[in-house]
Amino acid sequence: MAARWITSSLLSRSRSASSRALAYSLFRKDGSASGIFRRFSIAAAIEEPISPPVQVKYSQLLINGKFVDSASGKTFPTLDPRSGEVIAQVAEGDTEDVNRAVIAARKAFDEGPWPRMTAYERSRILNRFADLIEKHNDEIAALETWDNGKPFEQAAQIEIPMLARLMRYYAGWADKIHGLVVPADGPHHVQVLHEPIGVAGQIIPWNFPLLMYAWKVGPALACGNTIVLKTAEQTPLSALYVSKLFLEAGLPEGVLNVISGFGPTAGAALASHMDVDKLAFTGSTSTGKIVLELAARSNLKPVTLELGGKSPMIIMDDADIDQAVELAHFALFFNQGQCCCAGSRTFVHEHVYDEFIEKAKARALKRVVGDPFIKGVEQGPQIDEEQFSKILHYIKSGVEDGATLVTGGTRAGTKGYYIQPTIFADVQDGMKIAQEEIFGPVQSILKFKDLNEVIQRSNKTRYGLAAGVFTNNLQTANTLMRALRVGSVWINCFDVFDAAIPFGGYKMSGQGREKGIDSLKNYLQIKAVVTPLNNPAWL
């Protein structure tokens, strides 16, 4: 039942009836995989990519409400990860383009209608945008799959509906952001105002382009800010498409500007820009350090960071092993393993370790790898050749360090960036595959003896983004949820995301929180206003 629970939890409050039918069709009532799961066919599923049911409509920069070429006239190719072939040439923004976008955003904030509009009207525009997302759901999902490689069913039935749900959530907050009147020790009227922070710079990653777009754009707009957003160079297409829908929904020009380009040029220019008031970044910890330094060296702008992870997935000896295997499989392999919070260190109690290994292997061999546009495919290609090669390097490292390669370990097919679902057993804490973020379909399974040991080993990492716990013992769950130094703990579930649940990490997994009420604080300034009172009737 646990596997079905996590799937339904992940989809809850953000899906249609058809998506519910799909989610429940994947699992039997006992929680085991249904007949849809089978070993993939390379010839049918990988070697002959099908034509995507969508066309690229927008490939220029969006600045001040208009799609324009880059100042340099340069473009770069965005590639289909199924084949490595070019999808489209996209405008390559750099420092001059970022500056144009910031000027437009500044003017829209200082002189335009957006921050002066009633909060209710801002909420109506956000809701109209959500309506348009729902109207164009399948087209947006197809574009996301084509550019990213994630399964179309995942994009169409989970991620795009969640994008709309997040926007409706923030639309609901727009007219509920308010200040306070606080008492003072004397005859003074004291107001605490919550004001929009100004121009927000936002840098989103390639693994969940539109969800990260929503996590950042939604709260910034609800608070009355203007935005310059830089897309990941691997996945620029979907953000450009949906930003056009924002204009159709009535968003004033200059409020949302989108720059496609590379980190060392466009990203660095945005992070170091003196007229950007706030920066939000999602990506690797190493890049996050650079972003934070650039922000500090420029105008000391506040920065929200959602960075890497090496999340433990802890399987206790009282667990139902079949359910635990399915949940741990999902925790690691979802989205081709390209999740910052993936359960990439699977800790299994020694009493059930051998049984878990055998069943985890059987499940991995049933995983459907293939063209993400084919119904029933669970795993598409990795994002690009660089990530593909990096994952294979980590697999080689695991073998060389002495871990036992249980299954997988190489590419799938001969075309595109597909990798076989891979499992390592006998993994030790000091191995590179147990310490570093692989960001791919590689499950590392470690053995532990008791609760204190697994707590210590789970926390012995520079990361602290998330953790999973699978147990039937309430006291064990309570102990672990408090002891694990992470921002999210999923108990008998994993990757349960909701618009209202805050997300972020401890230690080098980032700073600040996204989603939920806490995300609004990232885009607000607090101002105290004090006025003297003459002969007040009360204090």
Image: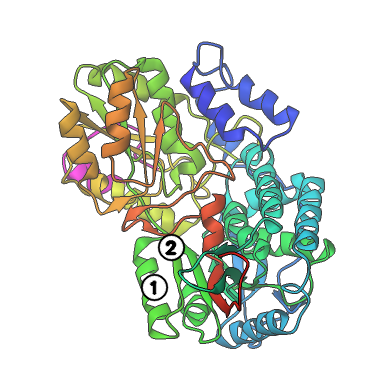
For the residue pair 117 and 359, the one nearer the viewer reads as 117
Residue 55 higher or lower than 486, as above or below: below
Mark 2: few/some/many CA within 10 Å (<14, 14-19, 20+) = many
Distance CA(mark 2)–CA(mark 1): 8 Å
- Kindly identify the residue that appears in the image at 48 percent across and 29 percent down: 367
Image quadrant where residue 434 sits: top left
| Residue at x-position 19% and y-position 21% | 350
Range drawn in magenta: 395-410
Which residue in the structure is indicated by mark 2? 305
Does residue 286 lie above or below 308 as drawn? below
Mark yes or no: residue 308 visible: yes
Return the x and y of residue 500 as percentages of the image width and height: 57, 44
On the picture, is 434 further left or further right than 529? left
Q: Secondary structure at mark 2?
A: strand
Residue ID at (53%, 64%): 182
Residue 430 on image: x %, y %: 16, 46
Q: Are marks 2 and 1 in contact (CB under 8 Å)?
A: yes
**At label 2, which amino acid type do we have?**
Leu
Q: Quadrant of the C terminus?
A: bottom right
Residue 432 is a magenta residue:
no
- Residue 408 located within the stretch drawn in magenta: yes
**Badge 1: few (under 14), some or many (20 or more) residues near its Cα, within 10 Å?**
many
Describe the element under mark 1 as helix, strand or loop: helix
Whole-percent x, y for residue 412 in the image: 46, 40
Q: Which residue is mark 1?
A: 292
* First reached walking from the N terminus: tag 2 or tag 1: 1
